[in-house]
Structure formats: structure tokens, C-alpha cells
């Protein structure tokens, strides 16, 4: 049964018609580019080979201690409640830092399917942006990605850049997954609204963001769009759409990556030219 709320950064957001809705699926007769630019996102179900995606999940979780996953099953990847690495997430020495630099991960990113999706949506030749964050959320963290849009982190527009959000494993809403604020990429007041209220748990960050998804939904009259993702799904989004993620509430760990492509004729933003590290502060 569906829960009556979802959580993000430990704040309950009602799953009612005012605050949330379902992400659109691709309809057979839709023009992909029109739907992508109209909605600001596009959910491709089963775009990637499920086994190849689970291979990535397994390869990453194999870098942890055997006791990390329930029954030592790194392919399924349910959190066993064991101690986590002493190091901060994603810094040098942490498995996520090593994994994004591994050849197996880079080969996964360079598979033709991802590039072809990006080419279709940007209607251009594209190149992959080297900096590719790995996200890993575990039950009990009570935290998720804050509401933000990519344009403030990367100097690009919907004509030059697309983000492909790739869950490395099944990611139902309760495991934590990406969620989009409906129509926010078309709202010229969005940045002012977020800034004006100053409703952020990161007051020293000058970028427009908020941890409070319930407040943002009510302040803008917009709904958070949710989906239960499966390994193999890919979601594309434009740099202007406000997105965030839901808190992990179940054993199944949420692992995902954000693969970005830009038109091949533009220079990649200097902040995005090297491998991701959680402390690179971009
Ligand atoms: O996976 C997530 O929690 C969101 C990641 C994201 O929004 C980003 O990297 O820009």
C-alpha cells in the first residue's frame, strides 16, 4: 500500500493531489523532444540492460566490507546495518571515490545507449562531461538531495546540456529517488521564490536551494513528481528544472549516478572537467 507521505530531508510531504503526482511515462505517439522540453524531464523505462546496471551496483558494493549488505548480497544491495567506512562519503579513500575512477564505471558511462539518448534530445553530436557524481543513500540518514537546479552548478541551458539520472538498481520512492517540481523549468519566478524565503538549512550556500520540499510545493503551487524506478530506467532532465530526492526509508540502498552530456561544439564548464570527488565543492 502506498504511504500517505514521502520524506525528504526528514520533512514529510503529503502524497496528496496538491503536493505530489506521478511522473509522466512516454506515450507511443509522443514526440520525444517536444515531451522532454515541455515537461523538463523524460523517463525512459528499461533503456539499459538490467543485468549490466546490476553489475555496476555489485561492483561498487563489492568495494565495501562483506558485512555491509544483507546476506553479503552486493547485487541486491540491502543495507545490513553494519558500520560504514570511517571516511566521509566520496572523498579519496572512500569506495565511491575509487569507483567513479574505475574503468568498469567509465565503460558503463560510455556505452552507446546513453550517448544516443543525449544526441536525440539535444539534436546534436554530444560529448560526455567527465565529472560524474555517484550518489549512495542509506536508510536512517534522514537526508536527500535538496531542491535545486543544475544551471547554478553548471553554466548550461536546455539547448546545450542534458543530465541522465541513472539508478544503479531498483529505486522505489521509499528507497530514495529523484523527484521533479512540475513545470518549474518554465517558472521565471522560481529562483526569486527560493531566495526570498531563505528557507534553507545551508544558509552559507549562495546558490538557490532548499531542504524543505513541502514548503516549496506550497509556495509555488507545484507538485513533486515521483516514480518507482527500476534498474535499467534512465531519466533525462533539463538544467532548469528543480529537482531533489526522497529519503531512504527501506533496507534497499539507493545508488545512482548523474551522467551529463553537452553539445560537442561547446566547451565543458571548467568545474566539470575532472572526475568527481565529494569534496571538490562544485
Ligand atoms: O540523485 C540525487 O539525489 C540527485 C542528484 C542531483 O540532483 C544532481 O546531481 O544534480
Image: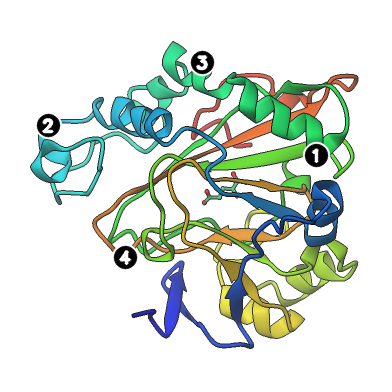
The residue tagged with tag 2: helix, strand or loop? Answer: helix
Q: Which residue is mark 2?
A: 66
- Looking at the rendering, in which quadrant would you find the C terminus? top right
Asked whether residue 27 is in view, the answer is yes
Q: Residues within 10 Å of mark 2 (few under 14, many from 20)?
A: some
Q: Which residue is mark 1?
A: 121
Query: Residue at point 40% right, 23% down?
Result: 99
Disc 2 versus disc 1: nearer the observer: 1
Q: Height in image: 194 above or below 47?
A: below
**Scheme by which the image is coloured:** rainbow
Is 233 positioned to the left or the right of 102 in the image? Answer: right
The residue tagged with tag 3: helix, strand or loop? Answer: helix
Determine the CA span between mark 3 and mark 4.
Answer: 31 Å
Determine the CA span between mark 1 and mark 4.
Answer: 33 Å
Is the C-beta of the residue carrying label 2 under 8 Å from the nearest atom of ligand 1? no
Is the C-beta of the residue carrying label 3 under 8 Å from the nearest atom of ligand 1? no
Label whose residue precedes the other's in the sequence (4 or 2): 2
Query: Residue 249, which numbered label?
Result: 4
Query: Residue at point 58% right, 20% down?
Result: 111
Q: Are marks 4 and 2 in contact (CB under 8 Å)?
A: no
Q: Position of residue 260 (x, y in %)?
A: 68, 33
- The quadrant holding residue 243 is bottom right
- The quadrant holding residue 120 is top right
Disc 3 versus disc 4: nearer the observer: 3
Amino acid at each position: 500500500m502506498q504511504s500517505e507521505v514521502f520524506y525528504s530531508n526528514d520533512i514529510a510531504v503529503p502524497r496528496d493531489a496538491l503536493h505530489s503526482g506521478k511522473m509522466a511515462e512516454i506515450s507511443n505517439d509522443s514526440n520525444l523532444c517536444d515531451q522532454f522540453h515541455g515537461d523538463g524531464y523524460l523517463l525512459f523505462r528499461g533503456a539499459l540492460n538490467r543485468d549490466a546496471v546490476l553489475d555496476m551496483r555489485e561492483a561498487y558494493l563489492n568495494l565495501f566490507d562483506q558485512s555491509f549488505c544483507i546476506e553479503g548480497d552486493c547485487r541486491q544491495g540491502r543495507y545490513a546495518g553494519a558500520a560504514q567506512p570511517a571516511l566521509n562519503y566520496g572523498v579519496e579513500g572512500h569506495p565511491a571515490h575509487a569507483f567513479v575512477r574505475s574503468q568498469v564505471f567509465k565503460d558503463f558511462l560510455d556505452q552507446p545507449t546513453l550517448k544516443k539518448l543525449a544526441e536525440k534530445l539535444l539534436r546534436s553530436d554530444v560529448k560526455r562531461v567527465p565529472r560524474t557524481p555517484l550518489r549512495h543513500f542509506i536508510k536512517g540518514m534522514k537526508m536527500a538531495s535538496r531542491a535545486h537546479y543544475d544551471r547554478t552548478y553548471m553554466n548550461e541551458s536546455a539547448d546545450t546540456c542534458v543530465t541522465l539520472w541513472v539508478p544503479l538498481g531498483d529505486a522505489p520512492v521509499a528507497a530514495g529517488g529523484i523527484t521533479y517540481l512540475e513545470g518549474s523549468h518554465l517558472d521565471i519566478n522560481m529562483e526569486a521564490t527560493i531566495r526570498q524565503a531563505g528557507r534553507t538549512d545551508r544558509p552559507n550556500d549562495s546558490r538557490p536551494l532548499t531542504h524543505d520540499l513541502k514548503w516549496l510545493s506550497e509556495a509555488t503551487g507545484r507538485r513533486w513528481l515521483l516514480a518507482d524506478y527500476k534498474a535499467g530506467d534512465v531519466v533525462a532532465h533539463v538544467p532548469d528544472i528543480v529537482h531533489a530526492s526522497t529519503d531512504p526509508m527501506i533496507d534497499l540502498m539507493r545508488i545512482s549516478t548523474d551522467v551529463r552530456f553537452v553539445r560537442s561544439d561547446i566547451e565543458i564548464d571548467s568545474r566539470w572537467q575532472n572526475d568527481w570527488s565529494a569534496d571538490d565543492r562544485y
